[in-house]
Amino acid sequence: MAFSTKLTLAASLFVFAPALYANQADVQAEIRALKLQLQDISARLQQLEASQGMQAPYDSRSQPETMIIERDETPAVTVYGLLEIEAGYSDNQQGSSSDLGVATVELGLDAQLTRNINATVTALYEEDATDLEIDQATLTLADLAGSGVSLSLGQTYVPFGNFETNLVNDTLILELAETRETAAMLSWEYQGFNVSAYTFNGDIDHGGDTLESLGVSLGWSNDGFSFGADYISNILDSDSLSAALAEDISEAGLDLSNIEDRAGAFILQATARLANLMLIAEYVDSERFSIGSFSERELQAVHLEAATDIGPWTLALSWQETDNAANLLPQERLSLGASTSINDSLGIGLEYWRDQDYSGRDADNLLLQLNAHF
């Protein structure tokens, strides 16, 4: 190549090199600007997804092997249970005895079918007392037509009595008045007030087979106090009384459908929580009835209890008395108990009580319970 040609090319490069360099710098600046815009758009999209509750695309690598069906971020179906194992000792005029047994096994299934429809099924087993059975089975429709009223249908314990206690044993009022029936019940709650009304076809049918047993429950509660008043049109349908009456009249070749007598009853109850002190009072009273050997009975029972927390332990003292409940319940019971939680699922309770029957005979009893709930 001639020297003049080389000189010309060199001069051209010298002239155009700054322009080429400037163009390259502009391109890099535009690329950086585009990157910043993309980052800004991505951030805005993430904010929009978060505000609208959008879910991220499905990624199989981030999913657990076993999926749990959820509705409104909570499981649609909940399984729960209770296990109580008890060791007891008793000493009375007939001698002493001791035992170890499975007091309670309870398994429940709670299904939230829709926002306001719930189904619950509970199975129960009590050694030497209750064979394995379906204890409760209910379908509840809440907030009917936006009214705040709930409708519950199925087998359940009707709201007749509170039966609250800090002791291991059930209260005598529970043993007398607890009533499990297949019922239709309307309930309403507002600012601490609650009202329930229900009907069922009891075992004692007054000579018929109709939905003629009725009940009403009224209550109010806040963080420190609760009060309640319950009424049932026939306390003879309670679990303990219907069983005792069925056994009593079976010798005459009769059953509960032949009983035409009825006995309405009411329960009054109140609880108070003052600092670490809890006070409980409950009273039941029935109308007079005469069936078989249960002649001119007007059943009454009272339960008074005080409990306090000392460290991790709850100490409780109660006095209970019944009237006209001979051959059903003790006439008087004095109880002292202590209980504590081992962890979130395990607990232990100890109770001593002295019973006095209607003949004035005493019996001393001791019970140790280990319970687990899940």
Image: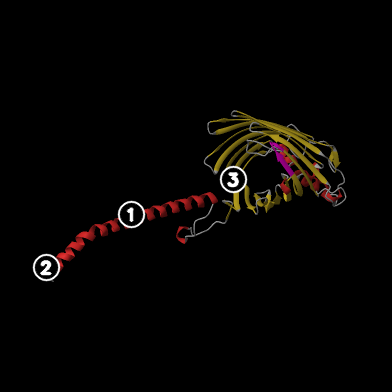
- Pick whichever, 134 or 2, lies toward us: 2
Start and end of the magenta stretch? Answer: 187-193
Query: Which residue is disc 2 drawn over?
Result: 3
Is residue 109 placed above or below 2 in the rendered structure? above
Extreme residue in the bottom direction: 1
- Please give left or right for residue 65 compared with residue 357 in the image: left
For badge 3, the amino acid type reads: Ile
**Residue 332 visible in the picture:** no
Mark nearer the N terminus (3 vs 2): 2
Please provide percent x and percent y for residue 108: 63, 51
Callout 1, which amino acid?
A: Ala
Tell me the quarter of the picture where residue 363 sits. Answer: top right
Identify the mark nearer the N-term, 1 or 3: 1
Percent position of residue 372, x then y: 57, 45
Q: Which residue is mark 3?
A: 85
Depth-wise, is mark 2 or mark 1 nearer the camera?
Answer: 2
